[in-house]
Image (tube, rainbow, N blue to C red):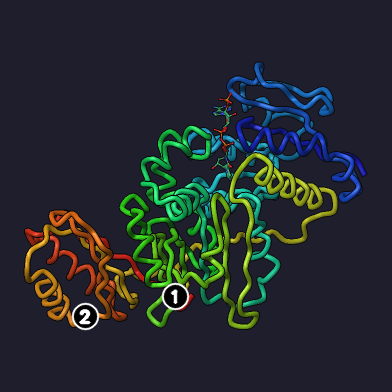
């Protein structure tokens, strides 16, 4: 069988990783496929200054992505640019030229995946997006193929390596978020603008894709409640440990009698849960199925090589489909709300909560806070206070028994008006059943 030929647009972290694997691992790849996977064209804005792997052979180098998508020899275009602007143009143009597409772009697929997939099906080409979520973990293949016979009831994930790195460093070293973030930026683990990572938006795009695949429901990022990790401090880990818990940025999609509850937020999780063992820049996804029960997937969530493997594996899958035929292409995205897994507001969820306060100490504080909780029918479970010298900025924690998120929000809003508080209380759900 003749080679299948690839054009790569974007030679940043992911593009160079994928290119290196295609060059270094070419013989293994053709052994596995039964034919070769050849790179015909590469593109980036500064392509002339890029060093390409010497074993790649002669390729077209261009700064104009249009030359790649219209290249007569290219069967598959890999879009590794990112964002929703030029990346969307590349995908649309590639599909219009009848080229199959591999993308690592979670942002684009989470916001416009259904339309793009429809156009691909109409054009009779293949689309693959494994690298868009959790870099090196083949979670799309798991949800679309591996456990597609199951009925997923819940999915939990640590979906952002940067925030997990920050939280686990904070846990181990008791250093504040700002210091760890600066170090991570200096080491190249975190972007200069870290908002997408630490404010939870990157994880939200990933959860939108995973939930769509897992539940077969139409899910958009706006269905997902999002809260980042900016307010977490080393003292929260101290209190969490006293409660035999730790803190992670958890992406969760759970089927409940009310509908699907979707959130990305910092939460207390038991130290004994498998998710608590996910350290540093690693990612994990835990899927619970009605028939197959629990399965857990773990690996590097980003980086040129792990994400490069996901891109190359997608290229191989699509190449196989091109060479051996693809009997039926089915979009993983629903267009209509199907009902059973209709997303509902996070405010209906019932959880135990951790409330952390910083107060200007004076008599009667606990009584005032307990009075507000009682007025919302929230039962107090424990009060914790680590030794502290600063009376004018005294931290302590109250945990409460399971209650609705709405009740907690109402209580926090009322508490925030109290003049002895240094800042609004921090309320974190306790995922005690994980
Ligand atoms: N980084 C990861 O570990 C990771 C993991 C999973 C998924 N992803 C996703 O993978 C995609 C790429 O991420 P990345 O980290 O590799 O990004 P990156 O390092 O910023 O690389 C982006 C590349 O796109 C090129 N580019 C930008 N605009 C272009 C244009 N108009 N025409 C041609 N080339 C253009 C850039 O060219 P120049 O180099 O010439 O400036 C650069 O080579 C994103 O969707 C990201 O979300 C990344």
Residue 317 horizontal side relative to residue 216, left or right:
right
Q: Describe the element under mark 1 as helix, strand or loop.
A: loop
Q: Mark 1 and ligand 1: say if the CB distance to the nearest ligand atom is below 8 Å.
A: no
Quarter of the image where ligand 1 sits: top right
Q: Nearer the viewer, residue 325 or 414?
A: 414
Residue 100 occupies quadrant: top right
Q: Mark 2 and ligand 1: say if the CB distance to the nearest ligand atom is below 8 Å.
A: no
Determine which residue is flagged by label 2.
378
Check the image and report above or below for 311 versus 354: above
Label 1 Cα crowd, 10 Å radius (few <14 / some 14-19 / many 20+): few
Q: Nearer the viewer, residue 262 or 401?
A: 401
In the drawing, what numbered circle is on residue 191? none
> Which percent across, then down, holds residue 66?
63, 27
Residue in the picture at 45% in, 48% down: 166
> Which percent across, then down, holds residue 87?
54, 37
Residue in the picture at 44% in, 53% down: 167
Check the image and report above or below for 152 versus 357: below
Q: Describe the element under mark 2 as helix, strand or loop.
A: loop
Residue 17 occupies quadrant: top right
Q: Is residue 120 visible?
A: no
Label 2 Cα crowd, 10 Å radius (few <14 / some 14-19 / many 20+): many
State the separation of the CA atoms marked 2 and 1. 31 Å
Determine which residue is flagged by label 1.
339
Residue 122 horizontal side relative to residue 424, left or right:
right
> Which percent across, then down, holds residue 70?
69, 30
Residue 386 horizontal side relative to residue 417, left or right:
right
Check the image and report above or below for 55 versus 317: above
Q: Is residue 421 visible?
A: yes
Q: Earlier in the sequence, mark 2 or mark 1?
A: 1
> Which percent across, then down, holds residue 364?
7, 71
Q: Nearer the viewer, residue 399 or 211?
A: 399
């Amino acid at each position: 069988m003749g080679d299948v030929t690839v054009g790569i647009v974007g030679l940043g972290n992911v593009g160079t990783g994928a290119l290196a694997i295609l060059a270094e691992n070419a013989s293994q790849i053709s052994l596995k496929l039964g034919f070769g996977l050849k790179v015909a064209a590469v593109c980036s804005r500064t392509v002339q200054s890029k060093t390409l792997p010497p074993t790649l052979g002669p390729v077209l180098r261009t700064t104009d992505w249009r030359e790649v998508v219209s290249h007569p020899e290219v069967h598959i275009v890999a879009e590794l640019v990112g964002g929703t602007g030029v990346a969307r143009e590349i995908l649309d143009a590639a599909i219009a030229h009848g080229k199959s597409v591999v993308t690592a772009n979670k942002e684009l697929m989470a916001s416009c995946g259904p339309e793009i997939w429809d156009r691909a099906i109409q054009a009779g080409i293949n689309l693959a997006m494994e690298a868009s979520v959790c870099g090196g973990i083949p979670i799309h293949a798991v949800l679309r193929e591996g456990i597609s016979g199951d009925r997923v009831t819940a999915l939990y994930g640590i979906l952002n390596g940067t925030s997990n790195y920050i939280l686990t460093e904070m846990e181990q070293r008791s250093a504040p978020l700002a210091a760890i973030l600066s170090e991570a930026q200096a080491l190249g683990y975190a972007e200069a603008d870290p908002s997408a990572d630490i404010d939870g938006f990157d994880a939200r795009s990933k959860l939108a894709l995973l939930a769509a695949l897992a539940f077969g429901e139409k899910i958009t990022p706006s269905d997902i409640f999002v809260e980042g990790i900016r307010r977490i401090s080393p003292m929260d880990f101290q209190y969490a440990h006293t409660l035999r818990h730790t803190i992670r940025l958890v992406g969760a999609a759970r089927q409940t009698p009310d509908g699907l509850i979707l959130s990305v937020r910092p939460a207390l999780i038991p130290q004994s849960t498998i998710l608590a063992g996910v350290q540093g820049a690693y990612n994990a996804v835990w899927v619970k199925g009605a028939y197959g029960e629990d399965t857990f997937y773990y690996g590097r969530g980003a980086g040129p090589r792990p994400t490069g493997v996901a891109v190359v594996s997608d290229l191989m899958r699509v190449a196989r489909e091109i060479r051996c035929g693809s009997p039926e292409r089915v979009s993983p995205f629903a267009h209509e709300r199907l009902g059973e897994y209709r997303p509902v507001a996070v405010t209906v969820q019932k959880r135990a909560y951790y409330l952390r306060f910083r107060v200007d100490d004076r008599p009667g504080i606990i009584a005032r806070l307990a009075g507000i909780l009682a007025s919302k029918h929230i039962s107090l479970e424990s009060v914790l206070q680590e030794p502290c010298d600063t009376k004018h900025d005294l931290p302590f924690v109250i945990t409460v028994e399971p209650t609705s998120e709405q009740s907690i929000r109402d209580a926090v809003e009322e508490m925030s008006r109290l003049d002895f508080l240094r800042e609004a209380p921090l309320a974190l759900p306790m995922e005690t059943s994980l």
